[in-house]
C-alpha cells in the first residue's frame, strides 16, 4: 500500500469488492494523485481512500477510484459508504454521520448505521432517465 499512497495507512480493509485505506491526515485524501495502473492491480474492483475530516464540518471525507470499471474517480459513490460508514461509526462511536466525497464534483451524504444496514440520504443529480423493461416486455 505504501507504493500506492507514498505512506503507510492507519488501516487497510476489504469487503471483497473495494479496498479501503484510512489515513490520519485528511490532506492526503484531498491531494491524492491516483495511479490507476496500481489501483487496477488490486484484487478488488475499486479503491477507497478516507480520513476523519479535521475541519469538523464532516465526520469523514473520502474518494473512490474504479479504473477496472472505466471510472477513474467516481464523483459521489453512495455504495462506498456501506463499508466507510461502518468503519467510521465504530471508530467515532456514532450511528449518524456526515460524509463528504472530495472528488472534483463532490457531494455530501448523511449516513446512518442501523444494525447491518446503512441508510444514505443527500441531494442527487439526475444523470439520465429511462424505462426499464422486465422479462423481455417490449410494451
Image: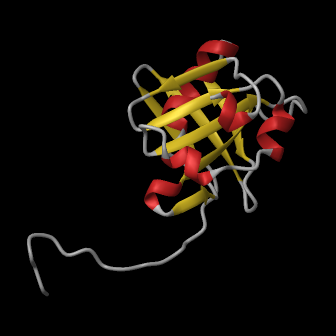
- Which residue of the protein is positioned furthest toward the bottom in this rendering? 139
- Measured from the top left, where is residue 91 in percent x and y? 65, 14
The colour scheme applied to this rendered structure is secondary structure
- Which residue of the protein is positioned furthest toward the right in this rendering? 55
- Which residue lies at the image location 49% right of the left edge and 63% below the top edge? 70
Q: Is residue 34 visible?
A: yes
Q: Is residue 98 visible?
A: no
- Measured from the top left, where is residue 104 in percent x and y? 76, 60
| Whether residue 92 is situated above or below residue 101 in the rendered picture | above
Q: Is residue 138 left or right of residue 22?
A: left
Which quadrant is home to the C terminus? bottom left
| Whether residue 124 is situated above or below residue 23 in the rendered picture | below
- Which residue lies at the image location 63% right of the left edge and 22% below the top edge? 88
Q: Is residue 17 left or right of residue 73?
A: left
- Which residue lies at the image location 74% right of the left edge and 26% below the top edge? 23
Number of numbered discs on residues: 0
* Picture quadrant where residue 12 is located: top right
- Observer-nearest of 83 and 98: 83
- Measured from the top left, where is residue 42 in percent x and y? 48, 39
- Measured from the top left, where is residue 47 in percent x and y? 56, 41
- Observer-nearest of 38 and 116: 38
Which quadrant is home to the N terminus? top right
* Picture quadrant where residue 10 is located: top right
- Observer-nearest of 69 and 41: 41
Amino acid at each position: 500500500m505504501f507504493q500506492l499512497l507514498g505512506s503507510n495507512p492507519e488501516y487497510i480493509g476489504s469487503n471483497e469488492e473495494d479496498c479501503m485505506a484510512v489515513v490520519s491526515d485528511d490532506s492526503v485524501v484531498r491531494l491524492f494523485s491516483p495511479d490507476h495502473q496500481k489501483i487496477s492491480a488490486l484484487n478488488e474492483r475499486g479503491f477507497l481512500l478516507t480520513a476523519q475530516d479535521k475541519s469538523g464540518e464532516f465526520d469523514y471525507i473520502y474518494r473512490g477510484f474504479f479504473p477496472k470499471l472505466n471510472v477513474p474517480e467516481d464523483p459521489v459513490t453512495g455504495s462506498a459508504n456501506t463499508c466507510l460508514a461502518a468503519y467510521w461509526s465504530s471508530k467515532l462511536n456514532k450511528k449518524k454521520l456526515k460524509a463528504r466525497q472530495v472528488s472534483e464534483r463532490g457531494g455530501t451524504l448523511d449516513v446512518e448505521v442501523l444494525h447491518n444496514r446503512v441508510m444514505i440520504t443527500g441531494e442527487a443529480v439526475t444523470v439520465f432517465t429511462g424505462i426499464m423493461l422486465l422479462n423481455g416486455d417490449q410494451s
